[in-house]
Image (cartoon, grey):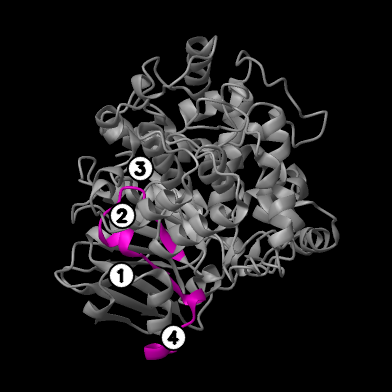
Amino acid sequence: MLHARGSLLTIDVGEQTATIEPIDDILQSFIGGRGVGTKLAHKRIPFDADPFGSENSLFFTTGPMQISNMSFTGRMNCTSISPLTDGLLSSNAGGYLSRNFTDTGYSAVEITGSADDLLAIHITDENVEFETVPELHEATIDETGDYFEKTRDLGEDQLVAIGPAGENRVRFAAVMTTSHRAFGRGGLGAVLGSKNVKAVSFAGQSPPEIDISSTQMDVHREAATDDNIMKRQGTTSVTALANEMDAFPTRYFEKQSFEGADKIGGEAVEQKKHTRGTCSNCAFACKLPTKDEKTGLETEGPEYETVMAFGGNAMVDDIVAIMKSNDLCDNFGLDTISAGDVVAAYLKAEDEFGNVELVHELLHKIAYREEEGDLLAEGINRFADELGVKDWTSKGMEFPAHDGRRLNGQGLSFATANRGADHMYAEMYSYEYPLVSKEDAIDPTGVAGKASLLIDAENENAINDSGIICKFSGSYLNRERYENLLDADYEDLLEIGSQIVDLERHFNNQRGFDRTDDTLPYEIEGLDSALDDYYSRRGWKKDGTVPNGVTAIRNT
């Protein structure tokens, strides 16, 4: 089986030490990326660790496909305990970082401990350097990138960094790279902030040698030549369909469609797109560099989830205002989904829907924890009662679009996902709109009989996140191509994906998570029966916990 190559580099920022150890057995069993990050976290982080404590570790991991020339492989993984959900969480980001990380020769980097002073860590294939950077206290992402370009000739494609939101431990702070790409969900930027790490750079000339099937070039060629609407509109291409199907959360989830959707959807974003944008080695080029000529605002995005959170949910039908919200989030280091939902909750509490100036003011206050921003920085689950709004979260994570009240299989996925309300954990919405072939499409109504498909989707996405292969590669990868690329039987790959999900669930079980956390803020008929079916098929107990007899746990 194809897998990542290279040692684990462990950096204790408190002691300012770096140690190297082989992890060949873990790489061979879990491929790379999310799988390796999850296994290492399960093995090395105490189950009772405080997300902001020095005993929590944060793992950056890459996969074997980052050695390839294939489209859809410009991604990296980050794993830690989330300060938003309090459970184990992995997030991945695109951009241009992954190849620079791979060039260091490491397959995984662990950051642990807690520094007394604000640090930057510089990792190469020769050494690790610790740099004290007090001048970057509460610097934005742009300011941080400019600093390292001037002082060290480092490009933004070599850096991960946190903005003021991460330093101030906003529970949905992102780790940013390449300015506008984010390890977005779950607040992993706040974990780096708790360790007093402002930035980490990667450089080297020691990539491992990995032989990858020529199938990679077939995928790359098709990605380059295919006429796909995502090349023009990115994920916002689904806006009109979601709105038409009543799957577009609006007015802080009070409604499921937005009358102003056409002003902020795919066509509106396409009109602002001024050049092509992509990730490392990817010919698909679905990113959205946008510019407003009137104001001079230039950014990347917004993507569909941001259009929902800062558009429909906040009752804003001005695409330029949403572009600015997106840009502020990127520069402050905030997850746009959680930030947008949090702002929408405040707008509801204050009866200020549509107040664009207030939206932008709140983002600044959240990032710097000023005034009401200090409360909002805690996330909806922790402030809902105080503001008198409904708690629109699952496992503490704010909801994305693809409304589960209409797309019931996606609702089931929101409930079961170990990350909480995360649309990318299984992407059940793609079968229910549908965005797949007629043969693979399913009725969006009801959850009966959907557990089996959900499990396969979760397992396959775990493999994508371990490879690491972008989720948008789905139209170009079938079973045969998975087998050729990863040199393994497809069913064996799904079993590895299942073990990854088991490990995540087991870790969270040790932190007190069980069936009572697999809930939604709305009712779906048959949900309890579907959960029973899901747990049974996964070999879990009826209370949503993983028995010690499950293979992945027995071998831990």
Q: Secondary structure under badge 1?
A: strand
N-terminal of the pair, mark 2 or mark 4, is 4
In three-dimensional space, the C-alpha distance between marks 3 and 1, rounded to whole angstroms, equals 22 Å
* The magenta segment: 149-176
Identity, as a three-letter code, of the amino acid under mark 4: Glu
Quarter of the image with the C terminus is top left
Whether 151 is among the magenta residues is yes
Q: Earlier in the sequence, mark 4 or mark 3?
A: 3
Q: Is 48 or 245 nearer to us in this picture?
A: 245
Q: Would residue 91 appear left or right of 390 to someone viewing this image?
A: right
List the residue tagged with mark 3: 88
Q: Is residue 300 above or below residue 351?
A: below
From this view, report whether residue 265 is shown above or below residue 499: below
Spatial CA span between label 3 and label 2: 28 Å
Dot 2 or dot 1: first in sequence order is 1
- Mark 1 or 4 closer to N-term? 4
- Which of label 2 and label 1 is nearer to you? 2
Decide which of tag 3 and tag 2 comes sooner along the chain: 3
Given residues 269 and 103, the one toward you in this image is 269
Query: Mark 4 = which residue?
Result: 149
* Disc 1 to disc 4, C-alpha distance: 15 Å
The residue beneath circle 2 is 365
Cβ–Cβ under 8 Å for marks 3 and 2 = no
179 in relation to 222, above or below: below
Q: Disc 2 versus disc 4: distance between alpha carbons?
A: 28 Å
Give amino acid for label 2: Lys
Q: Of the residues tagged 2 and 4, which is closer to the observer?
A: 2
The residue type indicated by label 1 comes to: Lys
Q: Secondary structure at mark 2?
A: helix
